[in-house]
Image (cartoon, rainbow, N blue to C red):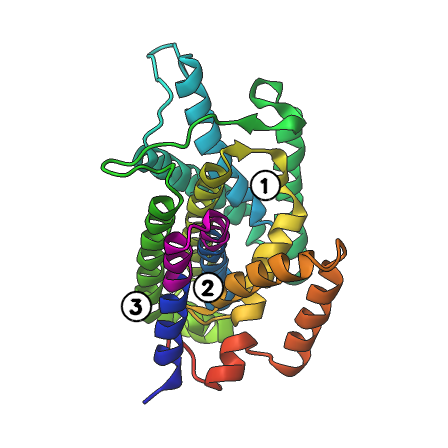
Amino acid sequence: MRREPILNAVLMVLLLAVPLWAHLTDEPFTITLATRAVIFAIAGVGLNVALGLGGLVSLGHALFFGVGGYAMGILAFHAQTYAPLIDWPMTIEGTKSMPVIWLVAVVASAIAALGIGALSLRTTGVYFIMITLAFAQMFYFFAISWPAYGGEDGMSIYVRNGFPGLNTMDPIQFFGLCYGLLLLVLFIVWRIARSPFGLMLGAARQSQARAQALGQVPYRLYLTAFVISGAITGLAGALFADLNRFVSPTMFSWQTSGEIMVFVILGGVGRVFGPVAGAALFIVLEHSLGGLSEFWHIYLGAILLGVVLFARGGLYGLLAGRERAHD
């Protein structure tokens, strides 16, 4: 029996068991850490669609993370201040409904990814990396200079947004909501990886000439993957903003893009469940090493260096060998 499905099951059971144990022992902070791990995992899975399946090294995915966060922040801000979002030519109110906010975050992030991808994908290699980074920094400085929504101080949301039938202020219920979305996103990406589109995307990643010989247009394949990637990352941004009940320009920063990429590299590029393992490990290291030193990123850098040099497939490559989740 293949080892990777077993690792996937163990990982998801552990990710569920830890917050349940924390709930029984009245440790809400541990539940919050698990929720952060789940949300970061969704962001990592989103990037992995572009990086792992399409071979697109994007250093600007914080842009979509931030767009999702600000979509949540703006809608919730107008709802809590009772000020309409738009009052001409028709009145559009803010909302505290999570499903509506998620839809807006996904659509806004997908539109942003479509526009940015259409321009960025005309380049390759280091130029593509720098263009995506430049777009993210443009949004970062725009958010800083946007006084209507807090500028560089950001916005605080007093009460977490609502979901029908749940008390989202209860940490374990909000965790369950995020965990369910992670399962949904993993299923969607798993299906994409095995679909004809996913197979052709993989072919284009390995050889564009081969994909063209089969009648495919690599640019369209890459753009589609980039849009899906941005939409998933935007959903993670909305959840992250809701978790903290706060949104700020730092969600657009290049450090955020770097962290999302670290999740993918630590877990395993191209493995569907790899970013989940990477995000969970990142949160564990942040919590454990952060208590030892404020310069804990030094230790993280050493671990990341070891993974890049000696475990090229990340944690999954180390534990499951050369098997790939989308084979």
Image height of 194 relative to 172, above or below = below
Q: Could you tell me how far apart the alpha carbons at marks 3 and 1 are, in whole angstroms?
A: 32 Å
Instruction: State yes or no: residue 27 in magenta.
Output: yes
Q: Position of residue 145 (x, y in %)?
A: 66, 24
Q: Are marks 3 and 2 in contact (CB under 8 Å)?
A: no
Q: Position of residue 111 (x, y in %)?
A: 43, 40
Q: Which residues are magenta?
A: 16-36
Give the residue type at disc 3: Ser
Q: SS class of the residue under badge 1?
A: helix
Q: Which residue is disc 1 drawn over?
A: 251
Instruction: State yes or no: residue 73 in magenta.
Output: no
Seen in the image, is 215 located left or right of residue 54? left
Using the image as rendered, state which of residue 156 and residue 312 is in the foreground: 156
Q: SS class of the residue under badge 3?
A: loop
Q: Which residue is disc 3 drawn over?
A: 195
Which label lies toward us, 1 or 2?
A: 2
Image height of 210 relative to 231, above or below = below
